[in-house]
Amino acid sequence: MTNQTIRVVARIVALPDKVEALKAVLLELIAPTRQEAGAIRYELLQNQSDPTDFTFVEEWSSNEALDAHLASPHLQTGITKLDGLVAAPPDIRRYHLLA
């Protein structure tokens, strides 16, 4: 399959007392990311039963578009703000849609 989009699931877990601070950092990423070339979908979810658990669900036109996003100034700035807010490093996984 050529021209298959790249799907990403990125899970970020806040420290229990830093949920709102982390949410603010993550929300700042949405508008600039949605304007990036190759961004098809970029959604932030918060777990209803565990408010420390955030997940980005993303779709990108190519690995190159995703790599450009990962290197973008706004994302790099956001990453620097995670220190002291997260319980573990973000878990970022790339997928291809099978069906």
Image: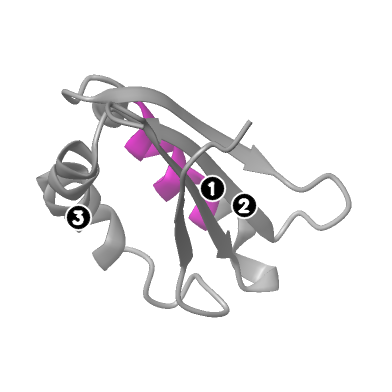
- At horizontal 60% and vertical 66% (from top left) the residue drawn is 14
Mark with earlier residue (1, 3): 1
Residue 63: x %, y % from top left: 23, 44
State yes or no: discs 2 and 1 in contact (Cβ < 8 Å): yes
Find residue 77 and name its label.
Answer: 3
**Front residue of 40 and 53:** 40
Task: Find out whether residue 27 is within the magenta segment.
Answer: yes
Q: How many neighbours does mark 2 have within 10 angstroms: few (below 14), some (14-19), or many (20 or more)?
A: many
Image coordinates of residue 87 in percent, x first then y, are: 57, 78
From the image, tell me which residue sits under label 2: 54
Quadrant holding the N terminus? top left
C-alpha distance separating marks 2 and 3 = 18 Å
> Of the residues shown, which amino acid type is indicated by label 1?
Lys
- Bin the neighbour count of mark 1 within 10 Å (Cα to Cα): few under 14, some 14-19, many 20 and up: some
Position of 92 compared to 48: left or right? left
Mark 3 residue crowding within 10 angstroms, few (<14) / some (14–19) / many (20+) = few
Instruction: Pick whichever of labels 2 and 1 is earlier in the sequence.
Output: 1
Q: CA distance from mark 1 to mark 3?
A: 15 Å
> Which stretch appears magenta?
22-31
Residue under circle 1? 23
Q: Inspect the image, locate mark 3, and give the three-letter code of the amino acid beneath it.
A: Thr
Viewer-proximal residue among 56 and 98: 98
**Which amino acid does the dot numbered 2 rest on?**
Phe
Give residue 66's position: percent from left, percent from top.
24, 43
Distance, label 2 to label 1, CA atoms, is 8 Å
